[in-house]
Image: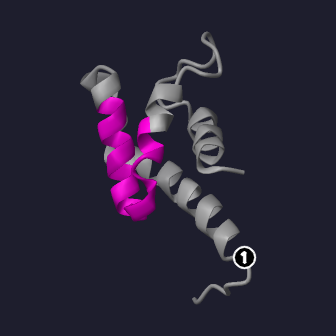
């Protein structure tokens, strides 16, 4: 699965603007493309910030999810990408 598909799956499952119940599945495609462009160097925290900024730029700021609300999706994206890249890496606790 490529980065775009991973992000699309997570963002669509989250549906941060609550639009997918009455719009098409590609509603967040412009936002997803912007998020993908920030992936190579983003940490989970930076990725949450990117998601927040992207949605703020594309939608009314009064409806945009907070950075804290973006963090769980950023973590899911990060885990899906990097757990797939390093599947034999053992987690330390």
Dominant secondary structure of the residues highlighted in magenta in the image: helix
**Residue 52 lies in the magenta-colored region:** yes
Nearest the eye: 63 or 86? 86
Mark 1, residues whose alpha carbon is within 10 Å: few (<14), some, or many (≥20)?
few
- Identify the residue at horizontal 61%, vertical 43% (top origin): 10
Q: Quadrant of residue 9?
A: top right
- Identify the residue at horizontal 65%, vertical 42% (top origin): 5
Q: Which residue is mark 1?
A: 87
The location of residue 49, given as percent across then percent down, is: 32, 50
Nearest the eye: 57 or 93? 57
Q: Quadrant of residue 19?
A: top right
Q: Is residue 21 left or right of residue 47?
A: right
The vertical placement of 82 against 72, above or below, is below
The location of residue 18, given as percent across then percent down, is: 52, 22
Nearest the eye: 50 or 63? 50
* Dot 1: element: loop
């Amino acid at each position: 699965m490529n980065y775009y598909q991973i992000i699309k799956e997570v963002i669509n499952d989250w549906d941060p603007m609550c639009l997918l119940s009455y719009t098409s599945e590609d509603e967040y495609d412009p936002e997803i493309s912007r998020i993908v462009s920030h992936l190579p160097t983003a940490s989970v925290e930076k990725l949450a910030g990117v998601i927040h900024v992207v949605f703020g730029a594309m939608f009314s700021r009064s409806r945009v999810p907070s950075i804290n609300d973006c963090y769980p999706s950023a973590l899911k994206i990060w885990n899906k990408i990097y757990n797939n890249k390093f599947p034999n890496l053992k987690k330390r606790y």
